[in-house]
Amino acid sequence: MTEAPAIEDRMLLEVTDLRTVFSTPRGPLFAVDGVSLSLHQGETLGVVGESGSGKTVLSRSIMGLLPGRNTTLEGSVRFDGQELVGASEATLRSMWGPRIAMVFQDPMTSLNPVHKVGRQIAETLRLHLKLSKKVANKSAITLLTQVGIPSPELRAKAYPVQLSGGMRQRVMIAIALACGPELLLADEPTTGLDVTIQAQILDLLAEMQRMRRMAMIFVTHDLGIVATRTDRIIVMYAGKVVETAPTRRLFANVRMPYTEALLHSTPRMADPSHTRLQAIEGRPPDLVHRPSGCSFSPRCPYAMDRCREESPPLVADPGEPDHLYACWYPRGVSKVSLPAREPSVA
Amino acid sequence: MSPDVATEAMPAAAPGASDALLSVRDLHVSFTRGGHTVYAVSGVSFDLAEGETLGLVGESGCGKSTTGRAVAQVIKPTSGSVTLGGVELTTCRAGALRRERTRLQMIFQDPISSLNPRRRVGDIVAEPLDIWHSAKGAERTRIVNEMLEAVGLDPKIAAPSYPRNFSGGQCQRISIARALVMRPKVLICDEMVSALDVSVQAQILNLVEDLKTSYGLTVLFIAHDLAVVKNVSDRVAVMYLGRLCEVGTAETLYRSPRHHYTSALLASAIDPDPNATQQHAPLQGEPPSPLAPPSGCRFRTRCPAAQERCAKETPELQETEPGHYVACHFPVTARAA
């Protein structure tokens, strides 16, 4: 958490130049296009982007959950030193649950509707931890208690339809945490939940993370969630990382115009009513026929000729090796460097 | 809109408010299913002054959408009154109601499923004109083109295309064009931006603000997103389990909420700002079932300030300060503004 960073040095996840390409009838679709990231034990990373930015495909690529047909996965995903790209199904299966777990957006379709929720949790425990039926059932109830489900013995016997959306998401979290994973991937875990329930689920995830010293990747479109609940943020646009920095630094010194636009188009409760929002014109690019140069250039208010011709590399902010952005004309930087470089302009 | 217009706006619960364009009084909607009755809306009253935007906010299942639909008479209210410019809608006969409805239009959440996929956009927008035989031929084309342009679409490209060629945001623009083609007075927007990405959401919210001015619209804006509601509304009404908890100007209500539910709701929402104090879930538990709502105040089961009286007496909306109404026996003490 941002308040008391509990980051240990042990590198848990290292993703290098990951590319996920779907072959479609229209041609190859670059859903994830050369993404690199790293995550330490106990750290929380937020992955932010709009729909179609590739954030969900990224998290599924890390998990190794994409269908084999029509999908090419290139690059490297090293989890605790072990390569996951190209790993066998058996290797991946041994990782899912005890080492890496995932919470999906829609708890209704992720749970089996014809099994009682207690059994679904116990199943995970029996499969991965080889617990006996009796012990597993008992642990399932302990887990339900931990995720804050009232009268857990009773709820263990309920079917998913008998639970509310918030309760189902708690069950999903219980299943994900059942085998004590070191990394939890949460893909829009609170989208579709009410705001008071969302606050409960976010608190629960934070508490579980602190208790278990888990690393967590939070995939979301909601800047509000990542602002207060992550150590670091990755902003994705059209399959690429366009900016990444420690959370506070990112909000304080936005460099990439897309991040800036995203922040300015989000309505805030702190602003007075009828505050004009700075909308981003146009819409995200087609990932099959991508624009040349920077993918954001067609919508960027500051775009110059160079932006439309050359794709900007991800570079570090001067003096801030932690803060990377992909932009030829970053915001805030030009103010310092322009007068020195082009004194005639002033 | 200037703040003085907001304060001039009619109080929501004041009975007998005379210059309200849309007036809702003691609206009840209940559904009976399998011998059980769901009390979706229980005694909701509010007024909309001409040119005003009233935000109706609440969590899923609180009855905000049902309220919107009952106001538009899409769902027949069980009891209560809805008057639009002095005309009582609940007792209107079918034909008269259809005519009245041209002055009151709705926009829904899912922009793609609310458009007929097999009709061209130009015809979708023109449909209300065709139904009322209000324009034909060149005049019809002129009106459609004007509407499409007003919502930011190029009529030459949009009119002959099908909805499938448009993104969610563009489909929502088409829905808006269709809703405005009969020049309604009142627009009911039911979660109109919740399916859209934040950058597109901003485009649509700005568009609604612009059209509100240029077409003189009065808006009932129903949404669950507190920041979105604050952005568009002059006044805000907060709903919980079928009842209104609090009504006030957007500024006052967000700055110093008086109902414990409003206060908890605001504390749960997060602005995109790392310096915002990290809030912890202020509410435990989940809303009770509307099949068996709690006696007295419906929020009392989750309320931190609930006392015995809350179970016995149902709190009514009371004016605590001019234009600010709270339904609570023990309201949050006003913070210094």
Image (tube, rainbow, N blue to C red):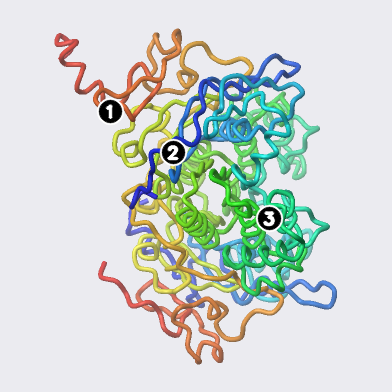
* x then y, percent, for residue B328: 46, 81
Q: Secondary structure at mark 2?
A: strand
Which label lies toward us, 3 or 2?
2
- Identify the residue under disc 3: B101
Q: CA distance from mark 1 to mark 3?
A: 59 Å
Q: Quadrant of the C terminus of chain A?
A: top left
Left or right for B245, reference A320:
right
- Identify the residue under disc 1: A320
Q: Secondary structure at mark 1?
A: strand
Which label lies toward us, 1 or 3?
1
Q: CA distance from mark 2 to mark 1?
A: 19 Å
How would you rate the neighbour count of disc 2 (Cα within 10 Å): few for under 14, some for 14-19, many for 20 or more? many
Q: Quadrant of residue A166?
A: bottom right
- Identify the residue under disc 2: A40
Circles 1, 3 touching at the beta carbon (< 8 Å)? no
Count of numbered circles on the image: 3
* On screen, residue B142 above or below B90: above
Q: Quadrant of residue A337?
A: top left
